[in-house]
Amino acid sequence: MTIELHKHPPHPHLALTLGLGLLLSVGMAACADDTTVGTESSTGDTTDTGDTTGTTETGGEDMDTGDGDGDGDGDGDGDGDGDGDTGPTEIVVGGEVTDFFTMMGIEAANVSVKDTPGFETVSGVGGLYEIMGMPPSTEVFFLIDGNEAEYWGGIRPAHLPADDIDDLQLGQISNQLIDTQLSILQQQDPTVMADETKAVVIVRLLQPTATGASVTFDPPPPPGTSYGVDANHMPLLDSPLIDSSLLPFWVAFNLEPDEAGGAYTVTVDHPVRECTVLHPVFPTLPRYVTLLDVDCPPPP
């Protein structure tokens, strides 16, 4: 089954720039000088820095004493009651489910955690959601779906922090925005089509000034199923380059689904920066968009 284009998409070039600009630039106001807040804060999805950074910092602080609470008694007991606890064993994760184009909350979207039964909810008014009892300091993959008439499903990787978080934003890309992107690509190659039984991966730079980055996707996508963004902020079919600071992303589509993860690898190279894919092993599902963030900090 293929996506049927809207007969009269409204100003596709403008819609793509505005829509994906919101998707890829929201929360990036501080990134003009490559300043990021936490490892995933630029996405607007994980603004708390307790995900991976907190764990690393804790390890550094405790290295000399081997003591979880830093009092030197070696009991690793954070509250001093002798029970050996080092923090909460369950956290509450909440935030918003939003439309990547309009940034409006999406009500009645299903939110769940892949391969973790019992952790699911439905977004309420304004797209607000909350899931209780989640494991802290853990990598998870959120699934957002249940509204196929308007949106593609979303797969959002996240490193959960050590404590409760109430501003982890999840999002979906609308059918209309997918159609708009496709219409622009068809101006370069009229045979380009998007298969709804396949998967999409978006590779996004956390630092929008890291232009000149080159994406290697393995196995390589067939011709006509990937694009970069050029210096004029327009999609360029079959390009591996990210040359736009407004839309710092690369997209592969019509991918064979891989629910377990591991079928695809992504590396990002830059002339002067070292780039790290934050979630190198990731799942892909039919008619879902998987979002992968890449950290490319400037050299010291």
Image (tube, rainbow, N blue to C red):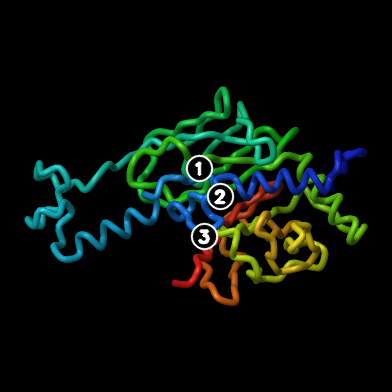
- Evaluate whether residue 269 shows in this view: yes
Q: Amino acid at mark 1?
A: Val
Q: Secondary structure at mark 1?
A: strand
- Evaluate whether residue 201 shows in this view: no
| Dots 3, 1 in contact, CB < 8 A | no
Q: Secondary structure at mark 3?
A: loop
Badge 1: how crowded within 10 Å, few (<14), some, or many (20+)? many
Q: Which mark is residue 34?
A: 3
Determine the image quadrant of residue 239: bottom right
Left or right of 149 on screen, residue 278: left
Determine the image quadrant of residue 185: bottom right
Instruction: Identify the residue shown where x is 80% and y is 45%.
Output: 14
Instruction: Identify the residue shown where x is 20% and y is 65%.
Output: 63
Q: Amino acid at mark 2?
A: Met
Distance between the Cα atoms at labels 3 and 1? 31 Å
Badge 3: how crowded within 10 Å, few (<14), some, or many (20+)? some
Which residue is tagged 2? Answer: 28
Left or right of 261 on screen, residue 286: right
Residue 287 percent coordinates (x, y): 71, 47
- Residue placed most toward the observer, 170 or 31: 31
Residue 230 percent coordinates (x, y): 75, 63
Q: Which mark is residue 113?
A: 1
Nearer the viewer's eye, disc 3 or disc 1?
3
- Residue placed most toward the observer, 187 or 246: 246
Sequence-wise, the earlier of marks 3 and 1 is 3
